[in-house]
């Protein structure tokens, strides 16, 4: 059975580049999720100043109704 490297060498150059790009994206995703493959939750608490003003459901409604750029939905 061929190794991954051997299989990639059998591909034409443009597909070799796609394979390299895919591997790079996997490595970036691994960096973002932490070394053990877990999410880092660095965003946790980012909206704590709004805790006394809104419930989580109210924030969800605000995001979809007021804050989200409706142009995205029109495309």
Image: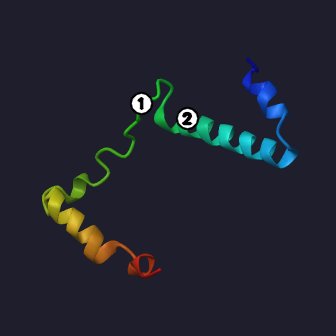
64 to the left or right of 15: left
| Residue at 47% across, 24% down | 36
Which mark is on residue 6?
none
- Near mark 1 (Cα within 10 A), the count class, few <14, some 14-19 or many ≥20, is few
| Residue at 26% across, 76% down | 65
Which mark is first along the chain, 2 or 1?
Answer: 2
70 to the left or right of 16: left
63 to the left or right of 24: left
Classify 40 as above or below 75: above
60 to the left or right of 26: left
SS at badge 2: helix
The residue that mark 1 highlights is 38
| Residue at 66% across, 42% down | 22
Q: Position of residue 35 (x, y in %)?
A: 51, 26
Residue sitting nearer the eye, 66 or 26: 26
Residue sitting nearer the eye, 47 or 63: 63
- Count how many numbered circles sit on residues in the image: 2
| Residue at 41% across, 35% down | 40
Q: Position of residue 50 (x, y in %)?
A: 21, 59
Q: Position of residue 62 (x, y in %)?
A: 24, 70
The residue that mark 2 highlights is 31
- Near mark 2 (Cα within 10 A), the count class, few <14, some 14-19 or many ≥20, is some
């Amino acid at each position: 059975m061929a190794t991954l490297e051997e299989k990639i060498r059998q591909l034409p150059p443009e597909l070799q580049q796609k394979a390299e790009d895919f591997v790079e994206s996997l490595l970036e995703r691994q960096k973002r999720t932490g070394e053990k493959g877990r999410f880092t939750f660095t965003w946790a608490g980012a909206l704590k100043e709004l805790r006394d003003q809104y419930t989580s459901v109210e924030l969800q409604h605000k995001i979809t109704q007021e804050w989200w750029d409706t142009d995205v939905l029109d495309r």
